[in-house]
Image: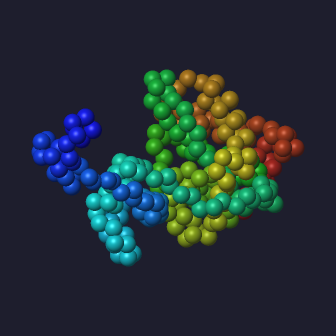
């Protein structure tokens, strides 16, 4: 209207019922970089908190931004969408895979997975003695939490001495506080491999490979009872009859010699 009809801005605004303040308003370029950095820092450190907790934390830190501005930036960063934080692991230091000089000095422990003929999945908890390569336990069930790991170790404690060290990966059952507290009470040092470095637990990985080839892949299982029975039979043969090249073609029982409690 101003350009084509030559009327003033006041007359044009009156004609279309538009406030002059609205017509003359120019959006201000707001620099939200400080708000963005503050929100990112908060949500990285405290991934479970929501908007209002973030807002009041910022206010307590001395920032004077109102809640509308903070919420605009908060939603712009998609922080209002529920997110799952990655569980942080403590830094794992690479430790050489040394062979102990006697039995029950260091045990290695690991999990395996397989399924029955009907598709039901199950797990195996394998424990070996690093010195003699003796297969101490194959625990079979659909669920093997940290409490079950402790129960297996308690059962082994009845027939032999517990080790000075336990070598394992960073599975949720192994990094649980429940297992850590139990091991502290027993005077056992926990050795964790670095994430993505299975060769740091090579002894049990080799044993797992043998179990996979000679037990799990060689048989069809219909029930967990069949798996447990075959696992017991396999352990008996593995420890007493199967010669190991790394042991000078002796069996684990022969290499370990008489056990002293």
Q: Position of residue 5 (x, y in %)?
A: 21, 36
Residue at x 46% of width, y 53% of height: 85
Q: Position of residue 152 (x, y in %)?
A: 54, 53
If the image is split into quadrants, where does the C terminus sit? bottom right
Above or below residue 22? Residue 115 is above
Residue at x 79% of width, y 43% of height: 251
Image colouring: rainbow
Location of residue 153 (image quadrant): bottom right
Q: Is residue 53 left or right of residue 213?
A: left
Q: Position of residue 124 (x, y in %)?
A: 56, 41
Q: Is residue 39 left or right of residue 159?
A: left
Q: Position of residue 247 (x, y in %)?
A: 84, 45
Residue at x 19% of width, y 42% of height: 7
Residue at x 38% of width, y 76% of height: 62
Residue 51 is at least partly visible in this image: no
Pick the residue in front: 31 or 233.
31
């Amino acid at each position: 209207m101003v350009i084509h009809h030559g009327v003033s801005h006041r007359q044009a605004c009156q004609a279309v019922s538009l406030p002059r303040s609205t017509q003359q308003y120019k959006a201000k370029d707001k620099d939200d970089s400080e708000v963005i950095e503050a929100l990112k820092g908060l949500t990285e450190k405290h991934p479970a908190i929501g908007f209002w907790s973030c807002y009041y934390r910022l206010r307590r830190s001395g920032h004077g931004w109102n809640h509308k501005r903070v919420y605009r930036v908060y939603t712009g960063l998609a922080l209002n969408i529920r997110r799952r934080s990655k569980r942080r692991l403590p830094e794992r230091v690479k430790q050489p895979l040394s062979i102990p000089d006697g039995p029950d000095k260091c045990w290695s422990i690991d999990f395996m997975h397989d399924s029955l003929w009907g598709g039901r999945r199950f797990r195996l908890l394998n424990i070996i003695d690093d010195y003699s390569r003796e297969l101490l336990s194959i625990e079979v069930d659909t669920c093997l939490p940290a409490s079950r790991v402790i129960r297996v170790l308690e059962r082994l404690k009845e027939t032999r001495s517990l080790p000075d060290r336990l070598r394992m990966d960073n599975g949720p059952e192994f990094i649980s506080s429940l297992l850590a507290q139990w091991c502290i009470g027993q005077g056992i040092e926990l050795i964790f491999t670095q994430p993505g470095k299975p060769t740091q637990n090579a002894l049990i990985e080799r044993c797992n490979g043998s179990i996979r080839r000679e037990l799990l892949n060689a048989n069809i299982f219909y029930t967990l009872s069949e798996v447990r029975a075959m696992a017991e039979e396999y352990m008996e043969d593995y420890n007493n009859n199967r010669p190991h090249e790394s042991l000078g073609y002796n069996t684990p029982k022969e290499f370990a010699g008489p056990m002293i409690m």
